[in-house]
Image (tube, grey):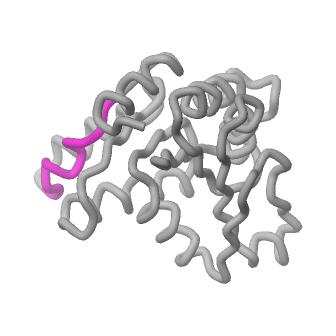
């Protein structure tokens, strides 16, 4: 089964539109035959897992034991599998090296780190190019500014596509990575 990682903020609550859109993304990915991988905790991670889980899909949470010890974070209840790691670095590597494609929902520094790490590994040839779909327009200014910069390799973002609906996300993923 092909795995799609969904990256995004831990902050949205169920009433937030990004949470609801993430539930729809997770549900549609599962219905299309993909396993959904997230960072395993709150916000977008819970939402995408919830959508996939409620659709009968496989949900993988990639967790970090220091988060649980220091912050009291607990894996969300919609995971069919938890993959705990001892360090944030190991967690990040697994989140980026394992999936066949990425969906990037709005998020903060952790989400930015995941997206940039994946892009740089692909640009450097350390991992094969993988479809990356950014949801909405949240990440567009960062990608636009950096892709026009004289300090960045322009092929760094060549694999990134944008989608404005959960359905468009899954269409873009399935066009490049059949389930």
The answer to whether 74 appears left or right of 121 in the picture is right
Residue at 39 percent of width and 22 percent of height: 171
Residue 158 placement, left or right of 98: left
The residue at the point 36 percent across, 58 percent down is 118
Quarter-wise, where is residue 157 in the image?
top left
Q: Residue furthest bottom?
A: 86
Q: Viewed as shown, does residue 158 lie left or right of 49? A: left
Image position, residue 30 (x, y; %): 59, 33
User: In the image, which residues are magenta?
Assistant: 151-161
The quarter of the picture where residue 168 lies is top left
| Relative height, residue 54 to residue 153 (above, below) | above
Position in image of residue 113 (x %, y %): 47, 59
Image quarter (top left, top right, bottom left or bottom right) of the C terminus: top left
- Residue 97 appears in which quarter of the rendering? bottom left
Indicate whether 84 appears above or below 75: below
Left or right of residue 5: residue 122: left
């Amino acid at each position: 089964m092909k795995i799609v990682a969904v990256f995004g903020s831990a902050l949205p609550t169920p009433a937030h539109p990004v949470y609801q859109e993430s539930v729809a993304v997770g549900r549609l990915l599962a219905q299309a035959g993909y396993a959904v991988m997230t960072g395993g905790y709150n916000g977008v991670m819970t939402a995408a897992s919830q959508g996939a889980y409620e659709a009968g899909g496989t949900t993988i949470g990639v967790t970090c034991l220091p988060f649980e010890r220091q912050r009291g974070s607990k894996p969300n209840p919609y995971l069919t599998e938890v993959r705990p790691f001892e360090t944030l670095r190991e967690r990040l590597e697994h989140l980026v090296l394992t999936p066949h494609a990425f969906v990037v929902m709005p998020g903060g520094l952790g989400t930015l780190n995941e997206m940039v790490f994946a892009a740089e590994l692909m640009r450097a040839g350390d991992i094969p190019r993988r479809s990356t779909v950014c949801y909405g327009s949240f990440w567009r200014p960062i990608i636009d500014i950096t892709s026009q910069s004289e300090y960045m390799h322009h092929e760094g973002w060549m694999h990134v596509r944008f989608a404005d609906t959960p359905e468009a996300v899954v269409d873009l993923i399935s066009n490049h990575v059949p389930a």
